[in-house]
Amino acid sequence: MPEEPAAPPVRRTRLTPEREAELYEAVLAILREVGYEALTMDAVAARTRSSKATLYRQWKGKPELVASALRHTKPITVADIDTGTLRGDLLALTACADPEQMERDAALMRGLGHAVHCNPDLHRALRELLIEPEKAALRLLLDRAVARGEIPADTPAMEFVAHTVLGAFITRPLIEDRPADTAYLARFIDAVVLPALGC
Amino acid sequence: MPEEPAAPPVRRTRLTPEREAELYEAVLAILREVGYEALTMDAVAARTRSSKATLYRQWKGKPELVASALRHTKPITVADIDTGTLRGDLLALTACADPEQMERDAALMRGLGHAVHCNPDLHRALRELLIEPEKAALRLLLDRAVARGEIPADTPAMEFVAHTVLGAFITRPLIEDRPADTAYLARFIDAVVLPALGC
């Protein structure tokens, strides 16, 4: 697995990865149940049988805990992808689209949209811990395609790959009234993203 | 102005276009103030000094009134665009992007996302009165480009133009933390949409 670039410095953790994953799942479960505003560190501590001191030592606070939980429970992280071809990498980005899970998480995302608007700290944490690391990893993925000679370094569409792929996920329910699935996303990659990149 | 295809049959109206526009503005103002759930036909009637009978005669009910208001207060309607070139048409689609208005309407849209999820009637009205007519008008716009020989009839990206352009609007705030503006959208059209269409 390649190293994740531009990720925040790793906090020395006293938690095992399994325990951390368990905590993140609990945070998401509580988020789905009560929403961001009503989620408390007390509730997370109680649900996971951990101390609040542990939670605050590991994460700075609620916005950081929620952003980390969202990042680590995503079905795929861009930094984990390196298939050897641009098309392979882009298909891998979308291969785990699970319409059922996306339907379930749509409500979570709607609620978070509102919470982000009302909570600058959450906004900042999501940018720092989720969005910027993914953007940096995508830049590396595209740089590798340039290095392999698959796309010229100055291809104008390169700066918009994130917008185009994320847009494909978000807009299908709005336009076609059904969630994005793997087959649709693969067609989209081949019909839009690769031709825009000159491939 | 070309005729709007696939629009629902025009209801014979006793309202002048100015009066209709005034009503739609009032509906949107109330929507912004109280949200969809709390909006009532009584409040619309009172605010616009019209009778509820008029409202129900003109529109079937609250979902249809709200969907019509959203459609008719949009800064641009695809069916009104016909510049003579595909690039001109696509740029016209995005030329009226007003970051200030989009910021203001972001809250409205977040609220509507929730309301659509909870109200199948609103969902249906938005599809019938807003989304499907815009999709049909976009198909005509692209058909004209095919007829002019600008794009081959079987270009795979054609079926995704709506996803790609709408995605550009929606994803910029998420990815870049700023609203889509006209200059960004023009760059996106030239870097992604036209190359994907083989132009």
Image (cartoon, coloured by chain):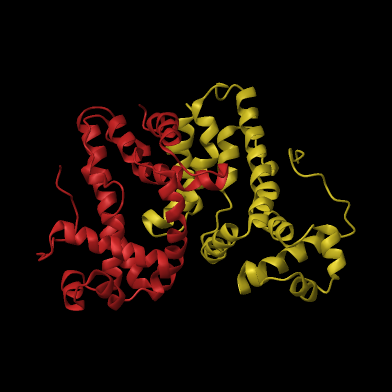
Chain colours: A yellow, B red
Name the quadrant containing residue B122: bottom left
State the residue in front, B128 or B10: B10
Q: Is residue A74 visible?
A: no
Residue A71 % position (x, y): 68, 53
Position of residue A5 relative to residue B125, above or below, is above
State the residue in front, A70 or A81: A70
Q: Is residue B36 left or right of residue B76?
A: right
The image quadrant where one finds the C terminus of chain B is top left
Residue A73 % position (x, y): 68, 58
Residue at the image point whose x is 44% and y is 54% from the top: B104
Residue at the image point whose x is 41% and y is 49% from the top: B101
Position of residue B2 relative to residue B113, above or below, is above
Name the quadrant containing residue A60: bottom right
Residue B151 % position (x, y): 29, 30
The image quadrant where one finds the N terminus of chain B is top left
Q: Is residue B126 left or right of residue A152?
A: left
Residue at the image point whose x is 31% and y is 75% from the top: B43
Position of residue B171 relative to residue B12, above or below, is above
Name the quadrant containing residue B25: bottom left
